[in-house]
Amino acid sequence: MYFDGNGVQKDQDKAFIWFRLSAKQGDPEGQCNLGYMLAHGFGAYQDVEKAFRFYKCSAEQGYVRAQFNLAHMYSEGLGTEQDWNEALKWYTKAAENGSLAAHYRIGVMKEEGRGILADEAEAAKIYAECAEIGHPKARFKLGMMIFEGRGVRKDPDKAAKILAKAAEEGNPEAMLQLGKMSLSGEGMVKSENNALKWFRKAAARGNNEAKSIIDKRSQ
């Protein structure tokens, strides 16, 4: 309540006190929330090592958000030594407990070979599963893998449809790619006007590459 001002005046100092009391009683939600505040320096001070310990206590009790955050700490080496095996272990636990974000992160690890052997076919499968549930970043990733023929059969037409859906959901990288495809005519009708439309949409959402392309084409 105090942390986000839900029904009371927002007060991160009070939120920290209540989360700490809850965490000391072994409550996994309180431990996770306290870990989050410590990780980001909200309400008191920043201490990523303590944050890691509270996330771990919470995650070991099966709290999904803590499992995801703990995996992130392991993957980035925050508050502990970087350990990709542990990151994968906790992302997997979180995904098994229903975390779509964790399932997506496993896909990224498998696509890029982060700490594990790359497996583009498995990554594409995971992205497809996440996209089906509505994960816009996964939809973009899947579209690019299909466009480039990585882990799946190359199919620019199919890729264009998937990327268009990601663009509709607000993904600026998908908008940028649709602009490039409109220029080349691969998977889409070749059209400079359509390309500029997509570049402008991407630029409006802060995509610097799209801004650069627009600037160069207007010179």
Image (tube, rainbow, N blue to C red):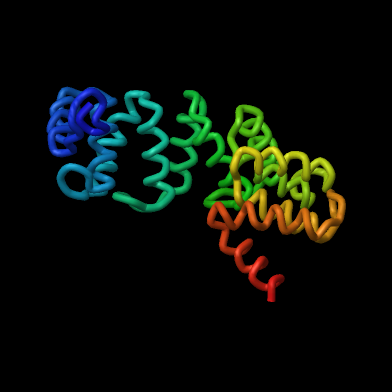
Residue 101 is situated, as x and y percent measured from the top left of the image, at: 50, 35
Nearest the eye: 130 or 23? 130
Is residue 177 shown above or below 8?
Answer: below
Q: Is residue 11 left or right of residue 90?
A: left
Is residue 61 shown above or below 155?
Answer: above
Residue 85 is situated, as x and y percent measured from the top left of the image, at: 47, 44
Nearest the eye: 183 or 33? 183
Residue at (14, 38) in percent of width and height: 13
Q: Is residue 34 left or right of residue 86?
A: left
Residue at (59, 57) in percent of width and height: 203
Residue at (61, 27) in percent of width and height: 133
Number of marks present in the image shown: 0
Residue at (56, 48) in percent of width and height: 116
Nearest the eye: 150 or 197? 197
Residue 97 is situated, as x and y percent measured from the top left of the image, at: 47, 23
Q: Quadrant of residue 195?
A: bottom right
Most extreme residue toward the bottom is 219
Q: Quadrant of residue 6?
A: top left
Q: Is residue 202 left or right of residue 153?
A: left
Q: Quadrant of the N terminus?
A: top left
Residue 219 is situated, as x and y percent measured from the top left of the image, at: 69, 76
